[in-house]
Image (cartoon, grey):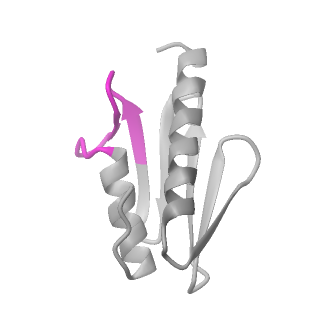
Amino acid sequence: MDDREFETRAEALLARLEAALEASPADLDWERVGSGILEIEFGDGSKMVINRHGVGQEMWVAARSGGFHFRWDGGRWIDTRDGAPLLDRVSELLSAQAGETIRL
């Protein structure tokens, strides 16, 4: 994937996540911080950050439970450690941190 395709796919993912967060009834706030960084704040004051990492062509997620890297596999973003799809993993992380079920 070239840099342009990466940027397009990363931006589409961030927009999808924003739309899902907007529709969620969970007690959280989110905002874009700069270009390519989505910061989510939970009711307890904790945060999660999702951002693109252009050099590695990865999406990075920093959550209370740890850091995760995702790479495009030709069809979806998958965890570089265990192959879990990004949307599934982020749903799990959001749910754990919010203390309620959040599905993306």
In the rendered view, would you say 72 is above or below 45? Answer: above
The answer to whether residue 27 is left or right of residue 88 is right
The answer to whether residue 12 is left or right of residue 94 is right
Give the extent of the magenta segment. 69-85
The answer to whether residue 57 is left or right of residue 32 is left
In the rendered view, would you say 28 is above or below 104? Answer: below
The magenta stretch spans residue 52: no
**Farthest top residue?**
2
Q: Residue at x 51, y 50 (%)?
A: 17
**Farthest right residue?**
34
Number of callouts: 0
Could you tell me residue 63's position as x and y percent?
47, 65
In the rendered view, would you say 26 is above or below 63? Answer: below
Could you tell me residue 11's position as x and y percent?
59, 34
The magenta stretch spans residue 81: yes
Q: Residue at x 38, y 65 (%)?
A: 93
Q: Foreground: 93 or 55?
A: 93
Q: Residue at x 42, y 44 (%)?
A: 69
Q: Foreground: 55 or 83?
A: 83
In the rendered view, would you say 56 is above or below 27? Answer: above
Could you tell me residue 54's position as x and y percent?
59, 30
Q: For the C terminus, which image quadrant? A: bottom left
Q: Foreground: 99 or 83?
A: 99
Q: Residue at x 32, y 64 (%)?
A: 92
Residue 31 position by quadrant: bottom right
Could you tell me residue 100's position as x and y percent?
37, 79
The answer to whether residue 37 is left or right of residue 103 is right
